[in-house]
Image (tube, helix red, strand yellow):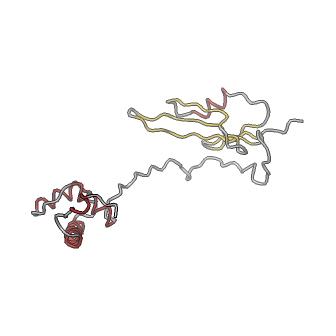
Amino acid sequence: MGLSMSTYNYDPKISRSEKEEQDADLRGKIEQIRVTFPRAGYRPLLHYLVRSGVKVGETKLRRILKEAGLQIHPKKKFVRTTQSEHDCLVYPNLIQGMSIDGVNQVWAGDITYIRINNGFVFLAVMLDLYSRKVIKARRTLMSRMLVLVGSRWRFKSGWLIRSGSVELLICRPLV
């Protein structure tokens, strides 16, 4: 048959049906606690269960939470960085009807921030819209990054259009 002696002699401490019944009881107690504390993770749940006299380990509790789909996923903090309601002039989209069929026809630039321990680092990037490759990138602690980047970077041909925090460089075809 090809089975080892340890497999043949294996005798589980409790049967599979008893284990499933115990897990179902524990799942019911977890759901009762979640009615009162809906955002409680596994650590507070473990404390509540131990206080109520249920002997359960952290590993078993986490396994039951995962199998039953009762894990709590942390809410991500949403930071709104775009200010659409402003009195500034909004420029028209100059590339709306244009067909981009080669590199160095249209470049787009954007600025974003990266949160660090003592504040923010600003990152400015210029991209080629056809190839989606980074042409230039710079980071600094200054908030007026694109104005500095636009004045420091030299372009062979084209127009530099500023619209809020976005810059567009539309290159003329080389004749």
Observer able to see residue 70: yes
Identify the residue at horizontal 17%, vertical 67% (top origin): 14
99 displayed left or right of 127: right
List the single residue furthest toward the right. 175
Q: Quadrant of residue 5?
A: bottom left
10 displayed left or right of 158: left
User: Where does residue 56 sit, x and y in percent of width and height?
Assistant: 17, 59
Identify the residue at horizontal 58%, vertical 30% (top origin): 138
Q: Quadrant of residue 131?
A: top right
68 displayed left or right of 78: left
User: Where does residue 127 sit, x and y in percent of width and height?
Assistant: 67, 40
User: Where does residue 114 sit, x and y in percent of width and height?
Assistant: 48, 38
Q: Would you place residue 66 above or below residue 132 in this image?
A: below
Identify the residue at horizontal 24%, vertical 66% (top origin): 34
Q: Quadrant of residue 49?
A: bottom left
User: Where does residue 30 sit, x and y in percent of width and height?
Assistant: 22, 66
List the single residue furthest toward the front. 1
